[in-house]
Every structure is written in C-alpha cells, then in structure tokens.
Amino acid sequence: MLREKLKKYKIILASGSPRRQQFFKDLDLDFEIRLKDVEEIYPPELKAVEITDFLAELKANAFEGELLENEILVTSDTIVWHKNKALGKPKSAQDAFDMIKSMSNAAHEVITSVCFKTSTASTLLHDITKVTFKDLSDESILYYIENYKPYDKAGAYGIQEWFGFMAVTKVEGSYTNVMGLPTAKVYEYLTTLV
C-alpha cells in the first residue's frame, strides 16, 4: 500500500541490523541499504531518550551533503535503560550476564529513536517500551548466552528468541520497538510524506 504512494521517493536504510532490514521488508517498503562506520559516542551527561536521539541523529549526519532530493535516509538507535543507566551491546559473556542479571525480577525500558533525513531537513521520533523480566536463575542466563550469543543486542537479549519467551512476563508498549524499531510509528510517519 505505502510502497505505491512512496514510489517517487527512494528510502535508504542506514542499518546493518538484520532485524531492522527484515522489518522494512515486512512493511512492504522498497528500500536500499547504505552503511557508514560511525563511532557511537555520546556526551556522558545525556540520559535515556537523549542518548538514542543523539545517536540516531549522529548516524544520519554522517550522510550530510550526500542525499539527493528524492531520498529519505532512515537511521536509528536502541538502548536498554535500567537503573538510570544505558545498557548497550555486551562486550563479553560476563558483561552480558551482568546486564541480564541486573534486570532479573525487574522492569526496564527499551528506547529506540529513529531519524528521517532528507537533503533539506531531518525529523526525529522515538518510542519507549517497558519490559518486565521474571526472577531468572543463573543457569538460565548462562544457557541463553552460551546458546544464543546475544552480543549484537542492546541489553544482551532478544525478545523474539527463547529468552524472550521464557523470561518476559510483561510488555507495555510496542513489541517491535524492543526488537529495535517501532514499526507502527515509522510506518505512520512515512504516510505523512505522501
């Protein structure tokens, strides 16, 4: 439906995430992938959504001056926000274990910001989903890390995997946001362009 309406535009997804790429396919959008290496460093005083907004915009600004008039660049960033701290991708098995253990029997927020950039303007949107984990045994956490190797995931877990089925007791907000893209909000924004 939207594919036809957006045919005068070229959508560029600047993400190496297989989940985000699959979402764009599942939303029935024509798009191409363009990647740039961006060092994802943000000022230490930023908190929660300020971090993801900053990083989504940082990724988009790497394409400054390169976009054609009909191109819409889409960048995004996801973090897990827990106990006033951003949990990004784990650097090791121990790091992954510590992250998951800290969220056991508690709620945390998954925050994703999305930046839409054209040759003349950029728009930011974000979404926040609250996720609650049951009380997790060390054994189940270690099993997950060993078998699923969640090193490419913010907060060291994928809600769409065994861990999500086993550990998550409540999701308040967008489920796809927890996977890295608030698809309903992205789709809604793209409909405003036509």
Image: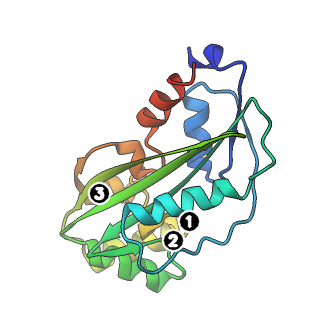
Which residue was labeled with disc 2? 89
Q: Secondary structure at mark 2?
A: loop
Please name whichever residue, 108 or 58, is drawn nearer the observer in this view of the structure. 58
Q: Secondary structure at mark 1?
A: loop
- Rendered view: 128 above or below 31: below
Measured from the top left, where is residue 186 in percent x and y?
49, 36
The three-letter amino acid code for the residue at tag 3 is Met
Measured from the top left, where is residue 28 in percent x and y?
59, 24
Which residue was labeled with disc 3? 166
Residue 6, quarter of the rendered image: top right
Residue 57, quarter of the rendered image: bottom right
- Using a 10 Å C-alpha cutoff, classify the residue at mark 2 as few (fewer than 14 neighbours), some (14 to 19) or many (20 or more): many
The three-letter amino acid code for the residue at tag 1 is Asp
The three-letter amino acid code for the residue at tag 2 is Lys
Residue 110 badge = none
**What is the quadrant of the N terminus in the image?**
top right
Nearest to the eye among marks 2 and 3: give it.
2
Looking at marks 2 and 1 on the same chain, the residue that comes earlier in the sequence is marked by 2
